[in-house]
Structures are given as C-alpha cells and as structure tokens.
Amino acid sequence: MHLIRSTDIALRVVMLLAGGGRLTVGQLADALDVPRHHMAKLVQRLQRHGFVATSRGRAGGVGVPATTLDASVGAVVRALEGEREAVDCDGPPCPLRGGCHLRGALRTAQQAFLAVLDGVRVRELVAEPAGRVLLDLVPHRPGGAP
C-alpha cells in the first residue's frame, strides 16, 4: 500500500512533536523541507482531527496532546486518507468488473496494512533509541528551548 505524500509528512510532524516541546509551522517546514504554506495546511488538518494543538503568542507553536501519544498510526492514516479503496473499479467502470477478483484481494491487503498500523501507537514511533535521534533533528529555538 502507498501513503500519499501529505500523510507521510503529517506522520513525520506528529513524530517530531511527540518528543515534547512546541515548534512553529516555519520550524516544522524547515525541518522536513516542506513549503511553509503546505505545512500550515497539514497542521490545520492534524489539528482538525485532534492530533496536534496550536497556540499563538511568544510561547506558542504546535504540539501534541497526550492523547495523540496513545493514538494508533492506523487512526492517523485513516483520518488523513479516509477509507478510500486501493483501486477505483467504478469510474470509469471497468469492463472486467463482473468476473474480477482483484478488487477484493486489494481490499483485503489494505485492511491487513491498516490492521498492522492499528497495532502501533505514536509513542512507539518515538521510543528509545529512535526518540533520541528524532529529538536531535528538531530545530531548537534561541535560548535552548525546542
């Protein structure tokens, strides 16, 4: 299965923020080499689904609520990508649709893919030793605070 690019980047955002602290949209965009306006849209989508929280002001930025750490990676992927099928047999209608078993096989594969991701919590993605590496990649604000 294949994740769309924005879901891949969104998962990376959640992983960067899961280590604690807050980052600005600009810092996230720089850290992941993504245009700032694209990052702003991703952060809005993540916020709409409750995976990140934002605040304004001097100590503001983007962070993750504690509930995100317990969320499954499958839940994040479903929220961002929806429940769409791996192939679209209906538009335009496929002439093989009546006797083809590919759609069912791909649906089963997609369910298995998401079932594996359901078994992984966000906190596991940033657990030691990977967590230390991720935190070293996070841009730090002047004054030492991430």
Image (cartoon, rainbow, N blue to C red):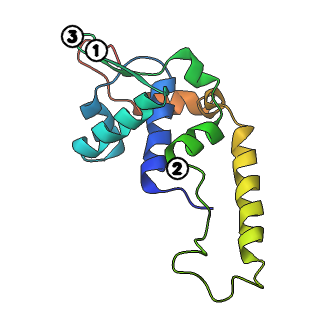
The quadrant where residue 139 appears: top left
Q: CA distance from mark 3 to mark 1?
A: 6 Å
Judge the density around disc 3: few (<14), some (14-19), many (≥20) Cα neighbours within 10 Å.
few
Determine which residue is flagged by label 1.
Answer: 60
- Amino acid residing under circle 3: Arg
CA distance separating discs 2 and 3: 33 Å
Residue placed most toward the observer, 48 or 69: 48
- Left or right? Give the position of 13 relative to 24: right
Specify the amino acid type for callout 2: Glu
Work out whether residue 89 or residue 31 is closer to the camera in this orientation and state it. Answer: 89
Where residue 95 sits: x, y (%)? 63, 89
Q: Which residue is mark 3?
A: 58
The mark lying in front, picked from 2 and 3, is 2
Q: Is residue 85 left or right of residue 51?
A: right
At a point 58% along the width and 74% down the height, the residue shown is 90
Pointer 3 with pointer 1, Cβ within 8 A: yes
Give, as a three-letter code, the residue at label 1.
Answer: Gly
The residue beneath circle 2 is 81
Rendered residue at 25%/15% (across/down): 56
Q: Quadrant of the N terminus?
A: bottom right
* Mark whose residue sits in front, 1 or 2: 2
Viewer-proximal residue among 11 and 96: 96
Circle 2 residues within 10 Å: few <14, some 14–19, many ≥20: few
Q: Is residue 53 above or below residue 26?
A: above
